[in-house]
């Protein structure tokens, strides 16, 4: 056995069965990148909440959840299913077309699966290192508070709101064939 390889075995019905051989550096790399990726979950969440205004925090959390659901829960099985299919050596055939895979190339599958898992982790860790380096350059972390608005004054028309253009006029309301101006 070559140095740096780990033999994975399991006892089955009193016999020791060899499940496979995995290079030690892959195990170590997966564990280290998984640990580093896990360390960035809460700091990433805190950075996200501190990066948006108070009014947009719930929208930011919702959008983050939406993206993680779309990319992880929906796309994940499709992508990994495609990876499994690319490792097939022999497809069974039936009258309706190609059936299930009859024989997989385990080494090819292992390499593809581990590579596909590690690339996003390395990209995530690289992005987190970039954000960390950029944050070290920033010296002013104060948050500008929006000016206070008196609600009563705004409702009585004493506060000029810039959200509606001055030349805007509401669209006419139509009821049947009659035209009624609002």
Image (tube, rainbow, N blue to C red):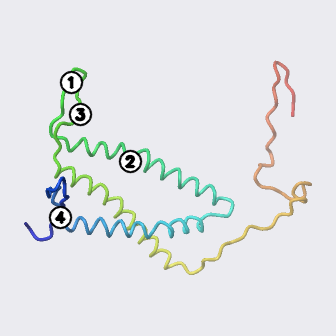
Quick one: label 3 or label 1, which is nearer the N terminus? 1
Quick one: label 1 or label 4, which is nearer the N terminus? 4
The residue that disc 1 covers is 94
- What residue is rendered at 87% in x and 34% in y? 182
Q: Secondary structure at mark 4?
A: strand
Residue sitting nearer the eye, 136 or 173: 136
Q: Residues within 10 Å of mark 2 (few under 14, many from 20)?
A: few
Q: From the top left corner, tell me how far across and down residue 157 is, in percent.
A: 90, 54
Q: From the top left corner, tell me how far across and down residue 39 is, in percent.
A: 43, 70
Q: Residues within 10 Å of mark 3 (few under 14, many from 20)?
A: few
The residue that disc 2 covers is 76
Q: Secondary structure at mark 2?
A: helix
C-alpha span from label 1 to label 2: 28 Å
C-alpha span from label 2 to label 4: 25 Å
Q: Quadrant of the N terminus?
A: bottom left
C-alpha span from label 3 to label 4: 29 Å
Rendered image quadrant of residue 58: bottom right
The residue that disc 3 covers is 100
């Amino acid at each position: 056995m070559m140095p740096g390889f780990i033999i994975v075995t399991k006892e089955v019905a009193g016999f020791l069965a060899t499940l496979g051989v995995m290079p030690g550096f892959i195990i170590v790399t997966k564990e280290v990148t998984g640990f580093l990726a896990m360390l960035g979950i809460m700091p990433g969440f805190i950075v996200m909440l501190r990066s948006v205004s108070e009014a947009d925090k719930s929208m930011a959390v919702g959008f983050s959840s939406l993206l993680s659901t779309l990319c992880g829960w929906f796309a994940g099985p499709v992508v990994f299913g495609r990876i499994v299919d690319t490792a097939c050596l022999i497809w069974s055939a039936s009258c309706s077309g190609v059936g299930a895979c009859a024989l997989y190339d385990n080494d090819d599958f292992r390499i593809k699966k581990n590579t596909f898992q590690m690339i996003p982790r390395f990209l995530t860790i690289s992005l987190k290192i970039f954000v960390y380096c950029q944050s070290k350059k920033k010296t002013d972390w104060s948050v500008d508070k929006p000016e206070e608005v008196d609600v009563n004054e705004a409702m009585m028309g004493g506060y000029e709101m810039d959200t509606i253009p001055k030349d805007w006029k509401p669209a006419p309301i139509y009821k049947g064939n009659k035209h009624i101006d609002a």
